[in-house]
Image: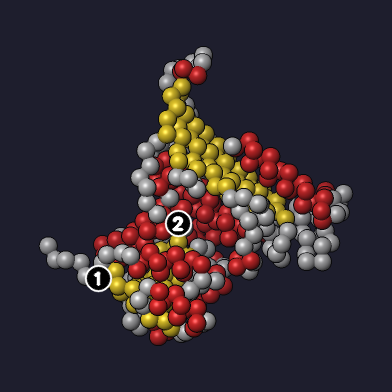
């Protein structure tokens, strides 16, 4: 059997996420890290030299030397960079969200098909070992709650919390529930940026499943939880600590806790970003469809955009003045509005703990 050749990789974007990808690629077997590109050459140089790679200020100079790239540039640049890479015959893993608009996402998908290249979207939570361990136990969920809370990161101020954080959970939700969405109810609040920094969403599916999602980048501490309720079982997933707890009904009628089995599922420890890149490499070498593909990434983006469009509960621009729809005219003070949202988020977080 012929030995698989080493793949030449490049990273476009030398920021926080690009650093994670560069460090991971540098330690992988079967991979040659060629270089790192960033318009800020000093930043590219610092990162590239740390991992024995070549720095570039222009991504065009890097693309011509590699088999595959990871696009870790700001979201508004995903389309331009992704199209250039695909059109030049380079397999592309683009960080989430796939693009800013559905039209841009469609362009990337079509370019990947036209040039027969792999296009994978960087929804890294799919590769969280806790999610991997839980998936085989999730069967026809009826109610799902997801909470993703963390401190503000000015690096992502160009997009709202839905596209920044919640999109991870939207991708998982669309993977776990095999049914059409029938309604979306959303509300959000701008706290630190010109976009929503807190959002809570309720999604209803045609099969009767219901999901409540909360995302915040205005919280003091980080928390990442998912809770799944289904027939005869409840599954609790802790993303951050990679733990999965399963509560399962063992008798037709529950008379005490003795009629339930409670166990921590075995979780195979592995860095999600490592698993994600290994999956990308495998898809390149075996011509498999990646998870998520451009099409799946586009579905998550479509839902995220629908949610951001429907967030109308509060509109607080940088002036601090509150503009609200008629049913909420009584909430006329920014501090009051913020307190309401913070209380709701904290209350839900306490319940899930």
Q: Is residue 321 above or below residue 130?
A: below
- Give the number of marks: 2
Q: Is residue 303 visible?
A: no
Q: Which residue is mark 2?
A: 124
Seen in the picture, residue 257 relative to 81 is either above or below; the reply is above
Q: Identify the residue at image location x=63%, y=45%.
A: 202
Say left or right for 336 vs 220: right
As helix, strand or loop, the secondary structure at mark 1 comes to loop
**N-term-proximal mark, 2 vs 1:** 1
Residue at 45 percent of width and 27 percent of height: 262
Locate the N terminus by quadrant: bottom left
Q: Is residue 124 left or right of residue 309?
A: left
Against 304, is 236 above or below?
above
Badge 2 element: helix
The answer to whether residue 317 is left or right of residue 246 is right
Residue beneath the point at 40% across and 85% down: 61
**Residue 19 x/y as whole percent:** 46, 68
Structural crowding at the residue carrying mark 1, measured as other residues with C-alpha within 10 Å and reported as few (<14), some (14–19) or many (≥20) = few
Asked which quadrant contains residue 152, the reply is bottom right
Q: Residue at x 86, y 54 (%)?
A: 332
The image's colouring method is secondary structure
- Across and down, in percent, residue 353 comes to 59, 37
């Amino acid at each position: 059997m012929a030995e698989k050749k080493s793949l030449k990789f490049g990273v476009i974007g030398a920021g926080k996420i690009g650093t994670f990808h560069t460090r991971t690629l540098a330690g992988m077997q079967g991979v040659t890290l060629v270089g790192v590109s960033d318009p800020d050459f000093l930043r590219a140089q610092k990162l590239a030299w740390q991992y024995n790679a070549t720095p570039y200020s222009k991504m065009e100079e890097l693309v011509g030397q590699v088999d595959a790239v990871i696009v870790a540039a700001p979201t508004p640049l995903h389309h331009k960079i992704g199209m250039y890479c695909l059109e030049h015959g380079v397999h592309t893993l683009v960080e989430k969200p796939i693009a800013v608009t559905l039209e841009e996402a469609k362009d990337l998908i079509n370019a990947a098909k036209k040039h027969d290249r792999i296009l994978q979207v960087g929804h890294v939570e799919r590769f969280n070992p806790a999610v991997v361990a839980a998936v085989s136990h999730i069967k026809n969920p009826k109610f799902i709650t997801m909470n993703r809370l963390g401190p503000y990161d000015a690096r992502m101020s160009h997009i709202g919390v839905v596209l920044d954080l919640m999109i991870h959970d939207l991708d998982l939700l669309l993977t776990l529930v095999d049914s059409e969405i029938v309604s979306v109810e959303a509300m959000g609040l701008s706290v630190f940026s010109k976009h929503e920094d807190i959002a809570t969403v309720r999604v209803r599916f045609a099969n009767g499943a219901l999901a409540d999602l909360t995302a915040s980048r205005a919280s003091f501490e980080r928390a990442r939880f998912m809770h799944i309720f289904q027939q005869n079982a409840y599954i609790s997933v802790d993303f951050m600590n990679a733990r999965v707890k399963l509560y399962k009904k063992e008798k037709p009628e529950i008379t005490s806790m003795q009629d339930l089995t409670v166990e921590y599922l075995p979780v195979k420890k592995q860095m999600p970003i490592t698993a994600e890149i290994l999956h990308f490499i495998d898809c390149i070498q075996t011509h498999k469809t990646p998870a998520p593909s451009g099409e799946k990434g586009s579905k998550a983006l479509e839902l995220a955009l629908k949610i951001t469009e429907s967030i109308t509960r509060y509109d607080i621009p940088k002036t601090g003045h509150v503009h609200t729809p008629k049913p909420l005219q009584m909430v006329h003070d920014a501090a009051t509005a913020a307190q309401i949202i913070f209380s709701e988020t904290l209350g839900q977080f306490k319940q899930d703990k």
